[in-house]
Image (cartoon, coloured by chain):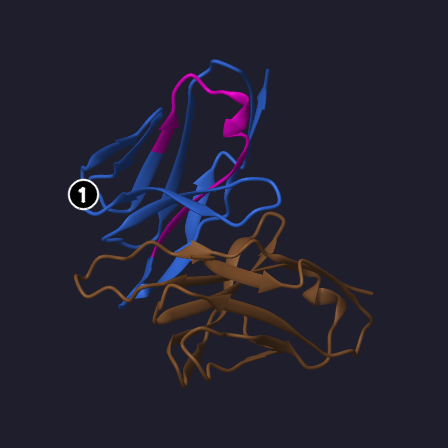
Chain colours: A brown, B blue
């Protein structure tokens, strides 16, 4: 199993450009999410999905769109990049808990995005 | 909303020293998770705690679920250089077992 994969690893954009960060998992996990990590802020949830066709907003959703057409893929779209979106982006997946206990969340290696 | 505060923000220690860090919440959690992030990598789960008062070990790491359910502690004994990284606590958002919120992280640097 490859686990959670993300592409690209690094990206530089100009203000106003658009791009899609790719995320895929091969563990058949129902739940996937996107986080951004900024110094001193920890990991903040951008969007998440509880299954194919279902997405919802997290803590910091503005400026980002997501879709979940398959269980495996969960791309994150920046429609018009802004310098405030310079960050490290992590995709994660987990198997939905049926026991009431939070399950282990598996993270991808991250995408380092700079917006000039 | 729910917040997780970690302290200290950073620690700079000598190899062989013991380390303690904690995580506090403004609300009750029924699960505490501790993750470690190596430089340039995504976070990896170290320890999961599911019951108030629970004490769980993973090698040199020991974590405890606070009795009040509003805090958790992580201890690392006899630190080594590969312990370097950022340590995060996490817990399920209220009413959403599968939606995690993360603390602000504790950066650990270990000098050989």
Viewer-side residue, A108 vs B94: A108
Residue A64: image location, x then y, percent: 60, 77
Q: Residue at x 16, y 61 (%)?
A: A99
Residue B83: image location, x then y, percent: 50, 28
Q: Residue at x 50, y 74 (%)?
A: A74
For residue A2, above or below residue A73: above
For residue A49, above or below residue B88: below
Q: Quadrant of the N terminus of chain B?
A: bottom left
Is residue B1 among the parts visible in the rendering? Answer: no
The chain carrying label 1 is B
Is residue A3 among the parts visible in the rendering? Answer: yes
Magenta-colored stretch includes residue A14: no
Q: Residue at x 41, y 50 (%)?
A: B4
Q: Which residues are magenta?
A: B74-91
**Residue A79 picture quarter:** bottom right
Residue B33: image location, x then y, percent: 34, 47
Q: Quadrant of the C terminus of chain B?
A: top right
**Residue at the extreme front of the image, as rendered:** A1
Residue named by callout 1 = B52
Tell me if mark 1 has few (under 14), some (14-19) or many (20+) residues whose alpha carbon lies within 10 angstroms of its own. Answer: some
Q: Residue at x 29, y 44 (%)?
A: B48
On the picture, is A100 further left or further right than A115?
Answer: left
On the picture, is A12 further left or further right than A21?
Answer: right
Viewer-side residue, A24 vs A48: A24
**Residue A52 picture quarter:** bottom left
The residue tagged with tag 1: helix, strand or loop?
A: loop
For residue A86, above or below residue A19: above
Residue B104: image location, x then y, percent: 50, 48
On the picture, is A64 further left or further right than A101?
Answer: right
Magenta-colored stretch includes residue B87: yes
Viewer-side residue, B13 vs B8: B13
For residue A107, above or below residue A26: above
């Amino acid at each position: 199993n490859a686990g959670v994969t993300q592409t690209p690893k690094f990206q530089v954009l100009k203000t106003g450009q658009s791009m899609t960060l790719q995320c895929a998992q091969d563990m058949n996990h129902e739940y996937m999410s996107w986080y951004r990590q900024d110094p001193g802020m920890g990991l903040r949830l951008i969007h998440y999905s509880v299954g194919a066709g279902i997405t919802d907003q997290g803590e910091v959703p503005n400026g980002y769109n997501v879709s979940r057409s398959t269980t495996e893929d969960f791309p994150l779209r920046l429609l018009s990049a802004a310098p405030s979106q310079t960050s490290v982006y992590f995709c994660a997946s987990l198997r939905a808990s049926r026991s009431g206990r939070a399950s282990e969340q598996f993270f991808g290696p991250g995408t380092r995005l700079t917006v000039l | 909303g729910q917040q997780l505060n970690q302290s200290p923000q950073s620690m700079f220690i000598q190899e062989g020293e013991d380390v303690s860090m904690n995580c506090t919440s403004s609300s009750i959690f029924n699960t505490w998770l501790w993750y470690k992030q190596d430089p340039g990598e995504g976070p990896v789960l170290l320890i999961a705690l599911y019951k108030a008062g629970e004490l769980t070990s993973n090698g040199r790491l020991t974590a405890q679920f606070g009795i009040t359910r509003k805090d958790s502690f992580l201890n690392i004994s006899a630190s080594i250089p590969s312990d370097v990284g950022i340590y995060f606590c996490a817990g399920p958002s209220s009413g959403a077992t599968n939606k995690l919120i993360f603390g602000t992280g504790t950066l650990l640097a270990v000098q050989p």
